[in-house]
Image: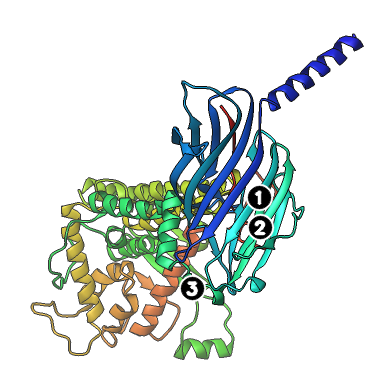
Amino acid sequence: MIRKTLVSIVLLCALFVTGSATLRITDFHADIALDETGTLNIKETLTVVFYSPHHGIEREIPISYRRPTGENLTISLNITSVESDSAEAHYTTQRHGRNTLIRIGDPNVTVTGTHTYTICYSVSRVLLFKEDYIQLYWNVTGNDWDIPINRVSATVQLLPGVPLDQVSTTSYVGYYGANTRGEQATSDDQGRFLFTAGDLSPGEGLTIDVAIPRTAVGILPPTTWQRTLWFLSANKYAALPLVTLIAMIFLWSVKGKDPVKTTIAPRFAPPPGMHAGEAGVLIDDRADLRDISAMVVGLAVKGYLKIKEIAEDELGVISKVKGLFGRGTPLDYTFIRLKKADTRLSEVEQTLLTTIFDDTHSEERTLSTLENQFYKVLPKIKSDLYAGLIAKGYYPHNPERTRRSYMGFGMTILFGGVAVAVVLSSLYMGAAVAISGLVILAFSPIMPRKTRKGVTVLQDLLGLSEYIGRAEVEKMEFHDAPKKNPSLFEKLLPYAMALNLTSIWTKQFEGMFEQPPEWYVGVNPVFSAHLFALSMMHISSGMERTFVSAPRANSGGHSAWGGSSSFGGGFSGGGFGGGGGGGW
């Protein structure tokens, strides 16, 4: 059994040696010349010995590189000529992954023995512009050859006038990532640097690193615009946020943009059949807590309930004096039912009234008893508000659902970008996807759309808002405006609250009231419009806090590369160039 195993190992080794011995490169020489445009003109001369029949050789040259951050870098490659034994050779080129594959030889002809192949090509976008110098970081042979190379040499011809004693050079030899230094470069009487290495096994290569002082060469770095174009060309996904923005603008114009409004004229009454909650929603496409508190005051104005402030029973002397001249803050509010819900109210108003006065609190109820209770019915009230506006033909769809659908999609794309960055190790691609998600999120608030009828009613509300908002201007006169009186004040107060114009509206009635409205009982003995405005704001904020309050869940409940060069240089296989090849 042991003998059979040893025989198998020997046979496998023999096959490997035989396979690797079918051809080899005895000499790999590269002449590299830098011109004034920053282009490298390269002439590779390969002497190949074929021990068995082959059609020729393949040479792969990378044209696209991936940095550790996931960014792609591309270079421009132009093949000028290919020769075999000093004669024009038959060859084909094709894209092979990130490389250009050059296949040299006739598929109908095989060769053996020693042959010399010459490949001439030029590359641009391969210089690295540092603060004080220009770096040529070039992988001469590449580390992907599957055949051995007996000897490697490379000459580098710089521009005339560059002082060689100010140029720094180094080289690296070995497998990809090896930082073993190669032989020291020498210079000749033609002003060229010469790099050499020998006996490279399959997978080993020679990389050179040349640093040229920027003051000694007149090559200009690429402009920001050029870099941007190159980046977008190599990383087409970088345009994803822009594509998403254009798509969302188009989608908004088709699905989310309201019909065009006409001229806004002052209005002195709310749209017929519209209560304050609906007015608040139509203004900003949202069912806010302010809209619901305005509905409660609207129910009081309509005579369905009374609101009473509750103050501390035992007030000190100082507190009593403050109550005479200032604002005493109530501790709570009592809602007193005056009428039961009936068909004169909208469905959502009926729901709100029956929620306040439930079976346990059928006649009176304090605001504090709604804490940790009202939140249960809050989604239904919001849903009913939207449903009522849809039924009236003001919206084609529920604005909240529309908004959330885009928000959900945007969040999915945003976190998808994070996943892309982690899984694919591509910071740039992940950022592009994540930014696209942010673009969708940014559009989500404006995607709810009104109908033409809804926009018409919105215009009336904006006209009402203009009347209420401009009423504070002294001696402001509106044509056909109604005379200010307590009835007008009470009628428009809920709408002023929904439009966030409470203090402006109440200020206009200073001195008109000696007593508060019948539906409101305050704790202060002195009444004024200013104090009443504060009362409305206090109760509004109090209701908003209470309506959204919910019990807390128990804790634990279910509920360029890097390094000394832009490529992370200092190793074999770094920089531009590279690739490999073999026989075919």
Label 2 with label 1: CB-CB less than 8 Å: yes
Q: Is 385 left or right of 159, judged from the image as shown?
A: left
**Tag 1 or tag 2, which sits nearer the N-term?**
1
Asked which quadrant contains residue 58, the reply is: top right
Residue 391 against residue 523 in the figure, above or below: above
Position of the N terminus, as image quadrant, is: top right
Circle number at residue 153 = 1
Circle number at residue 218 = 3
Q: Mark 3: which secondary structure?
A: loop
Circle number at residue 194 = 2
Q: Mark 1: which secondary structure?
A: strand
Q: Is 151 left or right of 192, judged from the image as shown?
A: right
What amino acid type is highlighted by mark number 3?
Answer: Gly
Residue 19 against residue 582 in the figure, above or below: above
Residue at the spot 44% in from the left edge and 43% down from the top edge: 81
What amino acid type is highlighted by mark number 1?
Answer: Ser
